Image: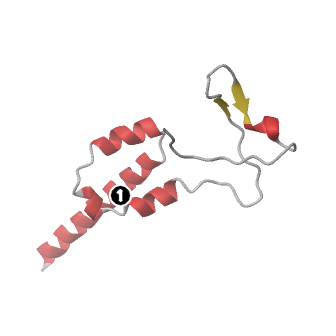
Amino acid sequence: MRTFVKYALALVVVYVLLLGGLLAAMYQPPAVFGRVMSKVPELAFLVFPFKQMWFVARKGRLNTGDPAPDFSLPTADRKARVQLSAFRGQRPVVLVFGSHT
């Protein structure tokens, strides 16, 4: 019985360490996170709660009513850049994140 407890404890420690490592990787920039995830075996997706960890790591700090963070993007023809803050106080802005072809 004592041997079983030792192995179970060792397994729990390894699980927690791997869980912490994956969560730490989720806080990294996308390129780093992608390199880490490319090395994770498929079995890990059955063992670790990836969705919940992702929500914790990427929850953000904005609250309802906070101004959106400023950013700029190139126009569709790539001849100019559009900055979000240029529209502040003038008119509503709708941001659509998706794919179009």
In what element is the residue under mark 1?
helix
Question: On screen, 91 above or below 47?
Answer: above
At x 22%, y 57%, the residue is 43
Counting every numbered tag in the picture gives 1
Q: Position of residue 31 (x, y in %)?
A: 43, 35
Res 53 → quadrant:
bottom left
| Residue situated furthest front in the rendering | 101
Q: Which residue is mark 1?
A: 19
Q: Is residue 35 left or right of residue 52?
A: left
Left or right, 19 with respect to 82, comes to left
Tell me where residue 26 appears, x and y as whole percent: 44, 49
In the image, farthest residue toward the top:
79
**Which of these two is toward me, 75 or 48?**
75
- Near-viewer residue (65 or 83): 83
Q: Position of residue 74 (x, y in %)?
A: 64, 27
Q: Nearer the viewer, residue 69 or 13?
A: 69
Outermost residue, right direction? Answer: 89
Instruction: Establish if 2 lies above or below 12.
Output: below
Q: Name the quarter where the N terminus is drawn.
A: bottom left
Question: Which color scheme did the rendering employ for the protein?
Answer: secondary structure
Residue at 53% across / 53% down in the picture?
58
Q: Quadrant of residue 46?
A: bottom left
The residue type indicated by label 1 comes to Leu
42 with respect to 91 (left or right): left
In the depicted structure, whether residue 20 falls above or below residue 86:
below
* Residue plotted at (78% across, 37% down): 85
Picture residue at 48% right of the left edge, 47% below the top: 27
61 relative to 75, above or below: below
Between 81 and 9, which is closer to the camera in this rendering? 81
Mark 1 crowdedness (10 Å alpha carbons): few <14, some 14-19, many ≥20: some
Q: Is residue 45 left or right of 61 when viewed as pictured?
A: left
